[in-house]
Image (tube, grey):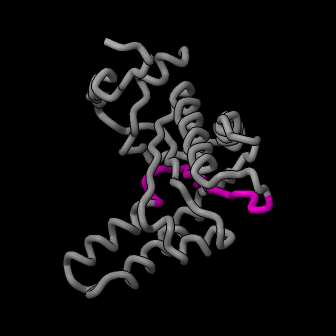
Amino acid sequence: MNVSDAIRTRRSVKIFKDTEPLDRETVESLIEAATWAPNHYFTEPWRFIVVQGEGRKQLSDVMKKWAIAKADDPESPEAEKRIMKMAAKPLLAPTIIIAVLSRDLDNKKAIYTEDVCAVAAAVQNMLLEAHSKGIGAIWKSGPAYHAEPVKDYFNLRQDEEILGAVFLGESAMKKDLKVHRVAHQEKTEWITGETE
């Protein structure tokens, strides 16, 4: 699969088969691909945490407790539904790679937004590499990944941030998603310096 095809045929997989986690060699190949992302001044502002097996259950428990603490009335039907949905998130796929923004604060040249973009580019590399290997993947984020109990579970430094979780495994989706994109011309402006 060439890069052009990979970019256009990759899809976010939302349903995974209940299979064994990806093997270490495969996971490391995805992370290695991620580290080839461009990063200004070679800051390499990323760190990755692999969650598999019982680690997913432990993360589920942490996220469930956070959701309970956050709810006004944890016993209401609406809150119970949200709590159970939150607890189920880490169990979605057999392998999760947490993408962490881990900046070198002593590097005076490093710029926050550039480092965020570098981690995002690393995740895109990972998604494309997974797709090229026939591995289903989806990049998820949300408030739970910024919650202190979740950051504590991953032993993050105070200045580190989770920019998302990449869920990986064998797709259980029944059909390919048809994806619509706005024509690139509608999102593009050309400035040539020429007068009309």
Residue 80 left/right relative to 111: left
Residue 71 left/right relative to 115: left
Residue toward you, 84 or 184: 184
Q: Which residue is most to the left?
A: 77
Q: Residue at (45%, 58%) from the top-left corner?
A: 91
Residue 195 left/right relative to 25: left
- Classify residue 187 by image quadrant: top left
- Classify residue 3 by image quadrant: top right
Q: Residue at (36%, 25%) from the top-left corner?
A: 189
Give the percent coordinates (x, y) of residue 36. Answer: 69, 34
Give the percent coordinates (x, y) of residue 194. Answer: 41, 13
Residue toward you, 7 or 97: 7
Measured along the vertical axis of the image, is residue 40 above or below residue 183? below
Q: Is residue 21 visible?
A: no
- Classify residue 65 by image quadrant: bottom left
Give the percent coordinates (x, y) of residue 154. Answer: 63, 68
The stretch of residues the image draws in magenta is 90-106
Q: Is residue 72 visible?
A: yes
Give the percent coordinates (x, y) of residue 21. Answer: 58, 47
Residue 140 left/right relative to 104: left
Q: How many numbered circles are shown?
A: 0
Q: Residue at (31%, 21%) from the top-left corner?
A: 185
Q: Is residue 97 magenta?
A: yes
Measured along the vertical axis of the image, is residue 57 above or below residue 108? below
Residue toward you, 55 or 196: 196
Q: Quadrant of the C terminus?
A: top left
Measured along the vertical axis of the image, is residue 82 above or below residue 76? above
Q: Residue at (49%, 16%) from the top-left corner?
A: 4
